[in-house]
Image (tube, rainbow, N blue to C red):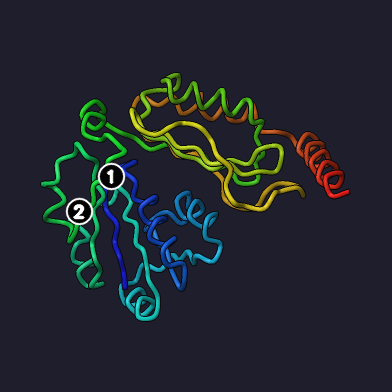
Amino acid sequence: MITAVLGNFGVGKTHWIKQQIKQNNEDIYYISPQTKTFPVDGAFLQSFFPDLSITDLESPTELLKLSQKNDVYLEIPEYLDVKAILSILSALNCQKIAIVSKDESKEKWQELADKIIVNKEVIMNDNLNSFSDLEIHRAGLTEEVLDFASLETFWQELTQGAYGDIFRAKGIFNIMDGQCVYGEYLHNSYNPEFYPLNIPLSLEGGPTHFSGLEIIGCNLDKQAIADTLGDFCLGDDAVNYYQQQVKETLLLSRE
């Protein structure tokens, strides 16, 4: 079976899929079209469910074949025109689920989805009305290790408007103690604090799993964002130093 999940930026599509996988974590595939080079949501889900298969299949025929023996969650990115791909979704014979906020008009989604689910934890309508000309900025950080204190300062500045009017931000970051942390922000809704992901500690050189930052907003100062991130990406010597410190601490804790 294929379940297509629709909804606005930050409304909770990925979190809803996470809840569904938690209930039945067997033979499940996840796909989000046009996100192969920046798979932040897939990487987030896979940190909770290591056996989750991430696929980049986009051929309806191949997806239908895959769904004959597996559950497939198809997360539709907000920047895709859902009306333009309705014929493809119909050909896939999938169930179309729209996630909406408690204050958001459901009218748009009634003609697009088979079922509408209300996320009572987010506020969208006021947000969407107060932002215009939204743009997306992505920063790939794979293999980079960040100073965590500086990351926290940057995140606070970012969410308080120092780099433009931020509507939505989310990211996966490697920090100096080998952990990988996740942060997300939605204007007037999500708690902006970081929490560790269930990814093995990276203690040998640059991490190889995906990490990166996605920002949605307007009047974004992209150069300042890039410069600030670069300022607290650690050099190889510093990364090696912290990794050795963590390994020594782990050895002592086992004695």
Q: Residue at x 31, y 38 (%)?
A: 121
Checking the image for residue 119, the label placed there is 1
Checking the image for residue 116, the label placed there is 2
Whole-percent x, y for residue 64 in the image? 32, 77
- In the figure, 9 relative to 37: above or below? above
Checking the image for residue 195, the label placed there is none
Depth order, front residue of 5/131: 5
The answer to whether 17 appears left or right of 97 in the picture is right
Q: Is residue 150 visible?
A: yes
Q: Residues within 10 Å of mark 2 (few under 14, many from 20)?
A: some
Residue flagged by tag 1: what amino acid is it?
Asn
Q: Residues within 10 Å of mark 1 (few under 14, many from 20)?
A: some
Q: Quadrant of the N terminus?
A: bottom left
Residue flagged by tag 2: what amino acid is it?
Ile
Q: Residue at x 42, y 55 (%)?
A: 18
Q: Secondary structure at mark 1?
A: strand
Which image quadrant is residue 174 in?
A: top right
Q: Residue at x 85, y 42 (%)?
A: 248
Q: Residue at x 45, y 37 (%)?
A: 184
CA separation, marks 1 and 2?
A: 10 Å
Depth order, front residue of 126/121: 121
- In the figure, 98 relative to 216: above or below? below
Whole-percent x, y for residue 8 in the image? 27, 44
The answer to whether 80 appears left or right of 34 in the picture is left
Whole-percent x, y for residue 167 in the image? 34, 31
Whole-percent x, y for residue 24 in the image? 42, 67
The answer to whether 180 appears left or right of 245 in the picture is left
Q: Secondary structure at mark 2?
A: strand
Depth order, front residue of 228/147: 147
Which image quadrant is residue 62 in?
A: bottom left
- In the figure, 217 relative to 140: above or below? above
